[in-house]
Structure formats: C-alpha cells, structure tokens
Image (cartoon, rainbow, N blue to C red):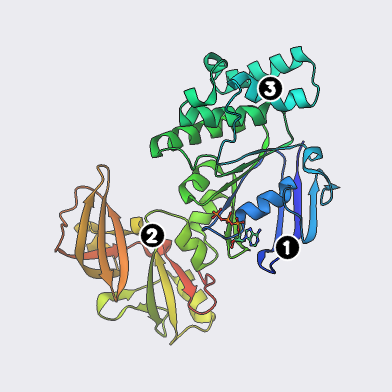
Amino acid sequence: MASLSLEHINKVYPNGFQAVKDFNLDIADKEFIIFVGPSGCGKSTTLRMIAGLEEISSGTLKIDGKVMNDVEPKDRDIAMVFQSYALYPHMTVYDNMAFSLKLRKVPKDEIDRKVRDAAKILDLEKLLDRKPKALSGGQRQRVAMGRAIVRNPKVFLMDEPLSNLDAKLRVQMRTEISKLHQRLGATIIYVTHDQTEAMTLGTRIVVMKDGVVQQVDTPQNLYNKPSNLFTAGFIGSPQMNFLDAKVLPNGDLDLGEAGKVHLPAEKAKKVVDGGYVGKTVVLGIRPEHLDDDPELVAKCDSTIKAKIEVYELLGAEVFLYFTVNGANMTARVNPRTEARTGSEVTFGIETSKIHVFDKETEQVIT
Ligand code: ATP
C-alpha cells in the first residue's frame, strides 16, 4: 500500500523565487499520476520534494498517513527514475541493477532473484552482462527502470524518463511503462511536459502552470471538461481553437462576418444567467468539432466561413488550417474532403461540444 497526500505544499527557493504554490493532492494506492505543464511550471520541484531531494518550504507531505517532511530520502521507500539514466558506465547491466541492494547488504541470492525478476519484466535477460555503452537508448532506459524495480519501493517517481529517446522509441517505451504499471501494481508519479504522454499514461493528470495546479482530473475529463483556458489549450493536439465572440441577448455568440453560433439551450442559459450578454467571451472549439461535409453543414445552425491556408493530409485524417478574425484555427476532417489550400469552406460546428470561457478570469462558463 502506498498512498500519498500533499497538503498546502509550497516551495520558495533560497533566492526568493516561489516555484510551487499551495499544492494539494491526495494520491491513492496504485494510481498513475502525471504532473504535466510547460517548462518551469514546478513539476520537477514538486517531484523532488516528494523524493526528499528538495526541502519543503511549508505544507505537509504524508506517505501512508505518516508525515515525511523531515525523513531522509533513503528512508522514504521511494525510487526515482531520471531523464538522464545515470547508469554506472563501468558496471554491467546486472551490477547496475544490483548496486543499491548490495549497498543495503541484501543477501546475494536474494539480490540475484530480484535482478533476474526485474530483467524478465523488462526484457533485459539477454543483456545482463553488457555495459551501458553497448546498449541502445531504450535498453538503457529499461536498465534505469530495472534499478528502481529491484528495490520494490512503495512509490516510483519518474522525471521525464523518455525525453532522451527518439520519437519511435518513446511511443514503444510508453506502452512498456503502461504495462509495467499494471504488472507492478505500484503507485507511480510521472513528470512530463508532453501532453500526449500525460494523456496516454495517466490514471489522473495534474496540470500545472507557474507553480499553480490548474486542474486535477482523468485524461477524459481534462479533454472534455477543461476548467480553464490554459488546460483547454494545453491538453489536445492539434490544440483547441479559441475565438472571441460577443454574446447576444438570446445567448447566441456573434463572430462578426465569420458567422454566428447558436448555443444549445443549456449552454446559452449559463452564458445569459452568468451576466455575459453584451460582453466578449472566448469560444473554444476542438478541431474535430468542425466539419466541412456539405450534408452535415446543411443541417447545422452554426457555421464558420473561412479560406483554407494550408491543407495537410495525414493519411487517416486531414488538417485544414485557416484564420478567423485574426485567430489561427485548425479543423480535423475526413480525408474525403474536397477542400484544398485556397478553398472557401463553410464549417458546421458541433455546438454541443463547444466550450465558452470568461475572457477576464479565463475560467470556463460552460
Ligand atoms: P522543466 O520541464 O523545464 O524541467 P519544471 O516544470 O520541472 O520544468 P522546475 O524544475 O520545477 O520546473 O522549476 C520550476 C521553477 O523554479 C523554474 O522557474 C526554475 O527556474 C525555478 N528553479 C528551479 N530550481 C531552482 C533553484 N535552485 N533556485 C531558484 N529557482 C529554481
């Protein structure tokens, strides 16, 4: 069992910079938690405070209910995997994995069993005699994981463990880590700035910006119900389209010459009741909720007209890039589309799926 709780955690570095602000989170046993956000948002600092590598300025960190703030890193029962694999170059794979157990004076036969078990899980059995320089990036990464696994820790902390790998290997290792999580049944906290990695690996995701938690949710909820503009724009690729729109008295959104959006009754009510009539709000539309199929567009009561600037065929889908009222937009449409660069296109909007944000507070209205 390994549950964690972070209560009102703050980090102020000695130079006075506050890297983490009032971080609160309860992590259940066996969860795969992702910290995601742009560079410098405080992900690594938070992870390092959990590991005990960085002092907690204020707040309480508990593991299984016990306060850990002043417990030495080695006594926290945590294993950390870094982006630089930090393998010992002069040691074999076997010795790299056995090293921490030897330090702990674990009996030799037990070390052997643990190393071989981990090697089996990670498919490293045939590489145990090799030195790190004779391994591929992915294999080195697996050895780094192996070193953590043999310790059988309560919690695994991983800081961008895949960032040194090429794109193909990253995808492969991503699946490996997912399987590993299921096999080990361990609690994992994983830091990345890559939203795709976050979405595919996490059972829950913590989105951070400027040291502040923006939203904590399942991948599905983050995608479908972002609570503010930042999360909406950060999660999803290509990213959500944002357009300024004026709210009309009946709750419709006016986009000027580009068109008008008729919100479903429930959404319109929230906008009107929220006191936004006459004000400018931000409309959020995911690229897949714009469609140029003429049959569909004919049935749509909300459309946007635009001239296509770039047509991009990706095989199973087409991305169309265009500008509306100065905002860059993307539509993700069927490859059967007749639109090409230069085409004048009318897109139908799937209004039940759109989001409306307060322009000032950047919080979601509906
Ligand atoms: P990245 O994805 O680039 O690793 P991150 O989200 O992990 O970013 P952190 O490494 O946690 O970010 O850093 C958060 C902020 O704290 C950054 O602005 C960074 O410059 C600052 N910072 C980190 N270490 C120190 C330090 N020792 N002293 C002062 N400021 C620091």
Residue receiving disc 1: 10
Residue receiving disc 3: 98
The x, y position of residue 189, in whole percent, is: 64, 44
Q: Is residue 338 left or right of residue 266?
A: left
Q: Is residue 317 left or right of residue 113?
A: left
What is the residue that sits farthest to the top in this orientation? 109
Amino acid found under the numbered disc labelled 1? Asn
Q: Which mark is residue 223?
A: none
Residue receiving disc 2: 286
Helix or strand or loop: what does disc 1 sit on?
strand
**Disc 2 to disc 1, C-alpha distance:** 34 Å
Helix or strand or loop: what does disc 2 sit on?
loop
Helix or strand or loop: what does disc 3 sit on?
helix
Q: Quadrant of the N terminus?
A: top right
The x, y position of residue 359, in whole percent, is: 48, 78
Amino acid found under the numbered disc labelled 2? Arg
User: Which of the two marks, 2 or 1, is nearer to us in this view?
Assistant: 1
User: Which of the two marks, 1 or 3, is nearer to us in this view?
Assistant: 3
The x, y position of residue 147, in whole percent, is: 65, 28
Amino acid found under the numbered disc labelled 3? Ala
Residue 232 versus residue 273: which sits nearer the camera?
A: 232
Q: Is residue 315 above or below residue 127?
A: below
Which badge, 3 or 2, comes first in the chain's sequence?
Answer: 3
